[in-house]
Image (cartoon, coloured by chain):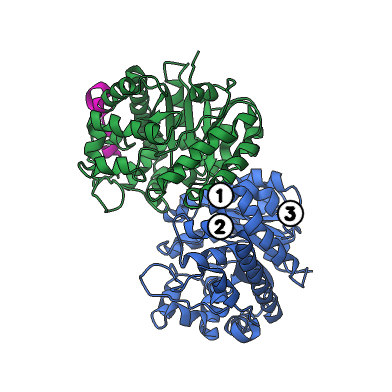
Chain colours: A green, B blue
Amino acid sequence: MPEHLFLKACLRQPVPRTPVWIMRQAGRYLPEYRAVRAKVDFLTLCKTPDLAAQVTIQPVDVLGVDAAIIFSDILVVPESMGMKLVVEENKGGPRFPDPLRKPADIRKLRVPDPAEKLSFVTDAIRLTRKLLDDRVPLIGFSGSPWTLAAYMVEGRGSENFQTVKEFIRAAPKDVHELLEKLSRAVSAYLNAQIEAGAQALQIFDTWGGTLPAELFREFSLRSIEHVVASIGRKDIPVIVFCKDCGHSIDAIASCGCHVVGLDWTVDIGNARKAVGGRVALQGNLDPTVLHSDPKTIRENVKMILAEYGKGPGHVFNLGHGIPPDVPVEHAKELVRAVKEESPRYH
Amino acid sequence: MPEHLFLKACLRQPVPRTPVWIMRQAGRYLPEYRAVRAKVDFLTLCKTPDLAAQVTIQPVDVLGVDAAIIFSDILVVPESMGMKLVVEENKGGPRFPDPLRKPADIRKLRVPDPAEKLSFVTDAIRLTRKLLDDRVPLIGFSGSPWTLAAYMVEGRGSENFQTVKEFIRAAPKDVHELLEKLSRAVSAYLNAQIEAGAQALQIFDTWGGTLPAELFREFSLRSIEHVVASIGRKDIPVIVFCKDCGHSIDAIASCGCHVVGLDWTVDIGNARKAVGGRVALQGNLDPTVLHSDPKTIRENVKMILAEYGKGPGHVFNLGHGIPPDVPVEHAKELVRAVKEESPRYH
């Protein structure tokens, strides 16, 4: 039986208060993180286990969050499959200079052994577990097959994902082949993270919401189901976070996961009614609230706790990653407010 | 009783086939539009009634759509209230160099007489009606109060609307004062468009979906309700299109409008069940489908017609504006496919 608040809440077990962590909590808003990044570039940080472990733990020490999430980037998986990944500072996000554009590009992709190609992540997990010394549990993660596919076909983040959507419509079989390869790579990667010590997993589907609901279920959710089903350890909670997919909460809750992550546009109270007792819910404060002031932050935390209501099964989080320009004091107030205001709901 | 297919469908009256028009149908994908724009800049086009009328009618002639929508821009309303509006070619969208940032900025805004400050729009409507000679009905439109407020506070389109959301949280009363002023301006503007000959109206809430569902209903939908209630002619169909608001279809359907516009992420079949017989639905093909090929376009049209199912109350449209780089032949195929495939559903 897990003793950690976060793990208990994921499994909808009774807890004395609501646990809280923050997506992208090891990030640029933290001076301690910026100090590390001043010395190394982003990919070097991802690929240097002792540095990755160091920044993973920072928000546990600084904010007092109830879980750590291993510092990495979702695009290391496509890189491990043979795609060249480039991250240039201050030039937009990471990108693939040679995006997938034809069936032969897909066929060339390898499904690697993560022990060989992604050992920097599993090493970082092992080291972080040791350094955390069981203070809080450690979350592993991956991008969803669809979100990775979208990046690999577009080459970078996109406004409307026109290229990958054209690909779906022109050659759905090729896209399914790509998703199938990605599902295998993601499954192996997540199982390797568990093997290394990850105590929970989150699957980030950042771009599922750009699809019509029906295509979301066919191209994104179905491959998430395959990944979840392939996870060997059934006692490890799996969180599925599909951004902008409020239309399919019910379907996501049936994908085999333990927790559904909600973005800030969804009413968490309505979502709870929709999922019944099937899964726990994670979320969902609008990240822009963190730009306001401590009083407003606390009021908004109270509103979300009240919307979720009494009983177990809530993991507090933002509805998306924490913005880089949030004052640390505001992030601290968020964590403090959840800890102080949530006991009355348990 | 309206004789036009489009107006009948808006009022859920029986029709022999589903009518179709395209958001942003008078736009850059049309060579005829680009020919006009080669001679004048965007704002001059908006403010020259005979040119605005000319481009308004182009898609009726070229594509055979079942409705025209007056060529204009939603930001002429804030401009008429006293804000300086700048549109620089190839430098991103239109912007307000002096955005609203403090209560005094809001107090300075005027609620103008549209007959005085926006006569270029009403003149264009009168001229278009004359030139259309009742071939198809003419739609007038406005941005929603919230969407206009978001532009006026941010100064331009924004990735996360942080500034206007901070404004909501720091000074909700001031934001309500702004929305109240905008509601009055939009109401007067829409009533003036009807007076000039608009036969239906669409309210565009482009940025409602950036808000948490509860704030969407408080800050955007409530002011839309005020606007809809203030429209004098109750026989004129009002379409409300809130992008990324699939979470609140039921609430939008109760705002007093006749038609709810859907973006492409929503299942139109589910939406029809949710709204029952209260309103008609407009939408909702993913605009990126228009980049594919005629066969794929027709298949996707058929899927949406089938999802909506049998019976009246469907106006076919895209789920967002037509992209500027769509081949005209593809837009024609969309219109042709709706006309040819929809009779079996009526």
Q: Residue A296: which disc?
A: 1
Quote the CA–CA distance across marks 1 and 2: 8 Å
Mark 1 and mark 2 in contact? Answer it, CB < 8 Å: yes
**Residue A123, image quadrant:** top left
Amino acid type at mark 1 = Thr
Mark 3 / mark 2, whichever is N-terminal: 2
Magenta stretch, main secondary structure class:
helix
For label 2, the residue is B170
Label 1 packing within 10 angstroms: few (<14), some (14-19), many (20+) = some
Quote the CA–CA distance across marks 3 and 2: 29 Å
Residue most toward the top? Answer: A1
Q: Secondary structure at mark 2?
A: helix
Amino acid type at mark 3 = Ser
Q: Is residue B67 visible?
A: no
Q: Is residue B182 left or right of residue A336?
A: right
Residue at point 65%, 43% (across, down): B270
Give the residues drawn in magenta, as a range.
Answer: A102-120
Both labels 1 and 2 in a single chain:
no
Residue at point 27%, 24% (across, down): A114
**Residue B6, image quadrant:** bottom right
Q: Is residue B345 visible?
A: yes
Task: Pick the residue in front: A107 or A141.
Answer: A141
For label 3, the residue is B254
Label 3 packing within 10 angstroms: few (<14), some (14-19), many (20+) = some
**Chain ID of residue with mark 1:** A
Q: Quadrant of the N terminus of chain B?
A: bottom right
Both labels 3 and 1 in a single chain:
no
Q: Position of residue A293 (x, y in %)?
A: 51, 51
Q: Position of residue A161 (x, y in %)?
A: 40, 50
**Chain ID of residue with mark 2:** B
Q: Secondary structure at mark 3?
A: loop
